[in-house]
Structure formats: structure tokens, C-alpha cells
């Protein structure tokens, strides 16, 4: 089992429901967001302008620089591919934030530890989908097993030619995007 996420940017309208659902699920203060939505564009020339929305959270990389660089072992891989942070081991040194090429880790000032998207591992462990997938009314998100060639996520990745962000960095992200 290797959990992954597929985000269809052709469907995402930037409503931020995933961001708010994630904040509620993780009881985050209003200034912390594990799932950020940004508008890209506009591109082109009037009247042919285009833009799209992109949601970015932890990519749960197989070759994660944050895991390799963590001096205490707080950042680690779970057996199912999810990159997790053990808050008991995190000393708030911020090195993982420095080496993450996606810039998605954040310091929780109240707790003095670094936090990020957990891919709702507790929900997945219980057989439920991630909160962001459950909340997306346009079904722009899909979670599933990247190791199962018969899973819907793998089929859609191949069918839609979905790609991870910055795949050229060699981090092997577990989050894929269908680009507009």
C-alpha cells in the first residue's frame, strides 16, 4: 500500500472548501493552512486569457529531503508512504522547512513544532477518505493506492496523463495533478 492523491486542476474552481475542511479536521489556527489554494495566471492576451487554481500541500515524497535532513528523526515515512512528523521528536529547528522544495511545512508557534498535511492518515487507517477529498463537491480530488494498478487513482493518472509537481527534482512525489 502506498497512499497517493490526484488533483484535477480542470475541475478545481478555487472555492477553498478543501482548505477550510483541512483546518477544521486538524483544529488549526486560522493562520496555518496545510492545503493552500493559489490562482495561476492569467496567461495569454486579451481576449484569450486563461487561469486556473492549484492546491498545494505536502507531496509525501518517496525521496523526501525533509526526512533525510531531519536531525532528530521526527520527519519519517510511514510504511504506507505517508510522510509524517512525530511532534515528540520535533525540536522546531526548521531544517525540514528549509529543504522542502514545495515550501509546505509550517511552524506552529503555539506548539513550537513544524506541521504539515498528514494526508489524514487517521482517517485512511479507519478506511475513510481524506477530509479534502470528502469535502470537494466537484470531485476534483481522489485518494488511493499508488501500488495497485487496478485502483481508480492509478487508472486516472494514466488516463489523464497526470504528473507530479517538479518531478525533475527526483523527490518522487505521491501527489499528482491533471493540468488544465
Image (cartoon, grey):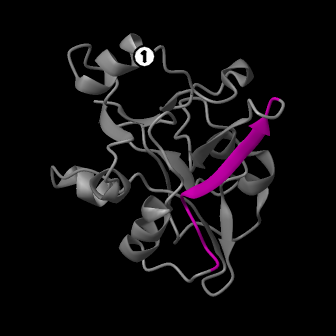
- Tell me the quarter of the image containing the N terminus: top left
Residue, far left: 127
Q: Position of residue 177 (x, y in %)?
A: 52, 30
Of 176 and 63, nearer the camera is: 176
Answer with left or right where residue 161 lies relative to residue 122.
right
Tell me, yes or no, whether the highlighted magenta stretch contains residue 39.
yes
- Horizontally, is 159 left or right of 29 in the view? left
Q: Is residue 108 left or right of residue 118?
A: right
Badge 1 marks a residue whose secondary structure is loop
Q: Residue furthest front?
A: 47
In the rendering, at what x and y percent does residue 26 appear?
42, 72
Q: Residue at x 54, y 54 (%)?
A: 14
Horizontal and vertical percent position of residue 120: 35, 57
- Against 148, residue 65 (above or below) is below
User: Residue 123 appears in which quarter of the rendering?
Assistant: bottom left
Q: Residue at x 56, y 34 (%)?
A: 61
Query: In the picture provided, is 1 more to the left or to the right than 56?
Result: left
Q: Give the residue displayed 71% in from the left and 43% down from the top.
A: 40
Q: Quadrant of the C terminus?
A: top right
Residue 140 location, x and y as percent?
39, 41
Asked if the magenta segment contains residue 180, the reply would be: no
Looking at the image, is 64 positioned above or below residue 171?
A: below
Question: Which of 128/53 is in front?
Answer: 53
Which of 29/100 is in front?
A: 29
Quarter where residue 101 is shown? top right
Q: Kindly identify the residue that appears in the image at 55 percent across and 31 percent down.
A: 173
Q: Is residue 110 above or below residue 157?
A: below
Residue beneath disc 1: 160
**Range shown magenta:** 31-44
Amino acid at each position: 500500500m502506498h497512499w497517493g492523491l490526484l488533483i484535477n486542476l480542470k475541475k478545481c474552481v478555487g472555492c477553498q472548501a478543501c482548505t477550510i475542511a483541512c483546518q477544521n479536521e486538524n483544529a488549526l489556527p486560522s493562520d496555518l493552512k496545510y492545503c493552500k489554494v493559489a490562482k495561476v495566471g492569467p496567461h495569454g492576451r486579451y481576449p484569450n486569457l486563461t487561469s486556473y487554481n492549484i492546491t498545494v500541500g505536502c507531496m509525501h515524497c518517496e525521496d523526501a529531503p525533509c526526512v533525510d535532513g531531519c536531525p532528530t528523526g521526527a520527519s519519517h515515512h510511514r510504511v504506507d508512504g505517508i510522510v509524517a512528523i512525530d511532534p515528540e521528536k520535533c525540536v522546531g529547528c526548521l531544517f525540514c522547512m528549509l529543504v522542502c522544495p514545495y515550501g509546505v511545512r509550517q511552524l506552529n508557534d503555539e506548539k513550537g513544532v513544524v506541521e504539515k498535511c498528514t494526508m489524514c492518515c487517521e482517517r485512511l487507517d479507519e478506511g475513510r477518505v481524506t477530509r479534502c477529498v470528502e469535502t470537494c463537491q466537484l470531485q476534483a480530488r481522489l485518494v488511493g493506492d499508488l501500488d495497485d494498478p487496478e485502483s481508480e487513482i492509478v487508472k486516472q493518472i494514466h488516463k489523464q496523463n497526470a504528473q507530479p509537481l517538479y518531478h525533475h527534482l527526483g523527490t518522487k512525489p505521491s501527489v499528482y495533478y491533471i493540468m488544465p
